[in-house]
Image (cartoon, helix red, strand yellow):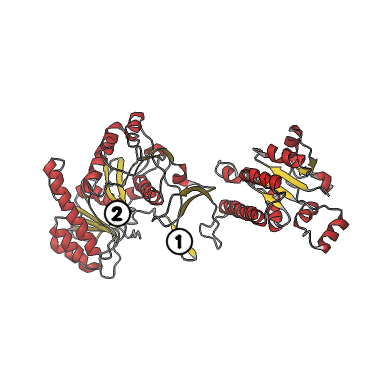
């Protein structure tokens, strides 16, 4: 009996070579709809699937292969006499190879189509054939990816068949594909952000040289249906990005976009809400620049120009920026590019690059230059735990209130730095304390197990930066006035340290059962303090 192949593909690339090989090798080829017509045009012998089913396609092509003649031919065990007898009784024949690729739902779900239009790109018959063939992979060769055509041709040509391991691998690939496909469909249809079963749809986009350390392997997967800002990034120059680069790049881009991305019209984080909460809401400078090292900011600042913002971010920690990542929310310009090439940096990321600025940066051959046109898109965050995932909403609410809890109100000049400080500290590893002046971080205390230590680090670093920048004439030498914290102060010790360093206004979430001693300390020491009722832990 002739071997029989069923070919039904949306993507016709490479199918002529596979079908020609099968036909020349004596296989009988069945096909459907557009694939049938395409193979006929290529003068490849082919039978319409309706000659096997005895039933013409109907419902505008929705039903072509959903028929017992197809699925019995795929699922029958050739070594089981009862299966073979059932096929013979029904007048069906086995199908030995299935080649199907699915309607492009991954792409169409992002195309802005209507619900009705998008639903038409959910492939039912193709997915059913793939799953049936994959279940019976010992008997049926199943191909779901054009990249596998050459390997199948080679095995059939030189060995006469595929090995059991090759068949099993192709079947596993089918179920991985249909799982991702179903996940994308489920994500599209579900209104629940956190349903009982979490559908994920991820595709390998890059095998990385190594993971967090040299002995760990790593791969980057991106969403198939909603790739987000990172998958839209374009690398313009430099070495391949590493696992740690990607982690830091992701943070750097989120930080600058939290202050607004003019290129796609994104407002600063919570901008609309803040105008109704903060008295005399200040207009912040539009340009943000951040330096990231070990997945936490080591410098962050705003300015009227990119050079101003970068200079202030650099001054926060001129040592740690070495080997770090610099991100900005406006196109890279020539003046800033000239400053950046004075340093060793791993990555520079921006929404765009002036042509001359790009050429300046490309002088550093290993510097990874990333163009990121879109602000972050993902509504959920995922953290792996052994045997599962923790899933939460992204931290997109900056503050829920502006509650003056002290006798003194913040001076108007401090409010802008308080808003800036709380936005910035939101992206610093906890425990996190940040000292701000003139819309720039002067001192950052990050990742400490004790909040007093985080405050002491931030205050001491701010003092050193103030002295250093005053010596160069880049600063007036006045002590910074604002301190921001990602969580509450259960004791007055941070207040006392802040007052000793010249701090005048503090912004923090509040919410401790022991808030009052910190409030009393502020009143006794002449500080203003505001509670936001919004915590920003970042572990």
- Residue ID for mark 2: 425
Image location of residue 51, percent across then percent down = 83, 44
Dot 1 surroundings within 10 Å: few (below 14), some, or many (20 or more)?
few
Q: Position of residue 306 (x, y in %)?
A: 28, 37
Query: Which residue is pictured at 67% across the width and 57% down the height?
Result: 164
- The residue positioned farthest toward the top in the image shown: 356
Quadrant of residue 488 within the rendered picture: bottom left
Q: Is residue 261 left or right of residue 444?
A: right
| Label 1 element class | strand
- State whether residue 336 is above or below residue 403: above
- Which sits in the foreground, 307 or 326? 326
Please provide percent x and percent y for residue 166: 64, 53
Placement of the C terminus among the 4 image quadrants: bottom left
Q: Is residue 213 left or right of residue 463?
A: right
Q: Residue 393 vs residue 70: left or right? A: left
Identify which residue is drawn at 79% across, 48% down: 3
Left/right placement of residue 49 relative to residue 449 reads right
**Tag 1 residue:** 384
Marks 2 and 1: which is nearer the front?
1
Between marks 2 and 1, how big is the CA–CA gap?
24 Å
* Residue 197 picture quarter: bottom right
Q: Position of residue 319 (x, y in %)?
A: 23, 48
- From this viewpoint, is residue 235 visible? yes
The answer to whether any part of residue 64 appears in the image is no
Q: Nearer the viewer, residue 163 or 380?
A: 163
Q: Residue furthest bottom?
A: 513
Q: For label 2, count other residues whose C-alpha is less than 10 Å away and answer few (under 14), some (14-19) or many (20+).
A: many
Picture quadrant where residue 190 is located:
bottom right
């Amino acid at each position: 009996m002739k071997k029989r192949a069923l070919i039904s593909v949306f993507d016709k690339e490479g199918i002529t070579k596979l079908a020609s090989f099968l036909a020349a090798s004596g296989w009988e080829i069945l096909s459907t709809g557009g694939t049938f017509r395409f193979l006929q045009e290529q003068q490849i012998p082919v039978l319409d699937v309706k000659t096997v089913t005895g039933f013409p396609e109907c419902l505008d092509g929705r039903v072509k292969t959903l028929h017992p003649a197809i699925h019995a031919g795929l699922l029958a065990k050739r070594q089981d006499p009862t299966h073979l007898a059932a096929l013979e009784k029904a007048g069906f024949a086995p199908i030995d190879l299935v080649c199907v690729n699915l309607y492009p739902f991954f792409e169409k779900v992002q195309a802005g189509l209507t619900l009705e239009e998008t639903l038409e790109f959910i492939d039912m018959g193709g997915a059913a054939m793939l799953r049936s063939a994959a279940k019976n992979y010992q008997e049926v060769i199943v191909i779901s990816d054009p990249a596998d055509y050459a390997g199948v041709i080679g095995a059939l040509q030189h060995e006469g068949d595929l090995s059991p391991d090759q068949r099993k691998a192709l079947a596993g690939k089918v179920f991985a594909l249909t799982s991702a496909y179903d996940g994308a469909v489920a994500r599209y249809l579900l209104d629940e952000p956190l349903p009982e079963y979490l559908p994920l749809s991820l595709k390998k986009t890059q095998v990385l040289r190594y993971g967090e350390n040299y002995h760990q392997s790593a791969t980057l997967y991106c969403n198939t249906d909603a790739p987000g800002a990172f998958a839209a990034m374009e690398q313009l120059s430099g070495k391949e990005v590493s696992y740690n680069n990607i982690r830091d790049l992701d943070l750097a881009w989120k930080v600058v976009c939290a202050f607004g991305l003019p290129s796609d019209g994104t407002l600063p984080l919570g901008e609309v809400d803040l105008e109704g909460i903060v008295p005399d809401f200040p207009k912040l400078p539009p340009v943000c620049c951040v330096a990231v090292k070990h997945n936490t900011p080591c410098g962050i600042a705003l300015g009227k120009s990119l050079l101003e913002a970068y200079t202030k971010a650099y001054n926060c920690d001129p040592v740690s920026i070495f080997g770090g990542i610099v991100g900005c929310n406006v196109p890279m310009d020539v003046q800033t590019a000239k400053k950046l090439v004075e340093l060793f940096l791993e990555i520079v990321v921006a929404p765009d690059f002036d042509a001359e600025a790009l050429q300046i940066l490309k002088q550093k051959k290993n510097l990874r230059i990333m163009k990121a046109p879109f602000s972050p898109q993902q509504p959920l965050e995922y953290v792996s735990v052994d045997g599962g995932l923790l899933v939460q909403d992204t931290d997109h609410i900056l503050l829920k209130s502006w509650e003056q809890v002290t006798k003194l109100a913040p001076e108007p000049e401090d409010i802008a730095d308080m808003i800036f400080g709380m936005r910035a500290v939101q992206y610093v590893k906890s425990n996190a304390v940040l000292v701000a002046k003139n819309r720039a971080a002067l001192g950052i205390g990050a990742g400490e197990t004790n909040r007093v230590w985080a405050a002491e680090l931030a205050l001491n670093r701010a003092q050193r930066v103030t002295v250093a920048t005053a010596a160069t004439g880049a600063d007036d030498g006045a002590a910074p006035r604002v301190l921001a914290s990602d969580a509450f102060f259960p004791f007055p010790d941070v207040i006392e340290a802040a007052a000793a360093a010249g701090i005048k206004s503090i912004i923090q979430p509040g919410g401790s059962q022991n808030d009052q001693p910190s409030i009393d300390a502020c009143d006794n020491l002449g500080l203003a303090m505001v509670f936001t009722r919004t915590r920003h832990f970042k572990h």
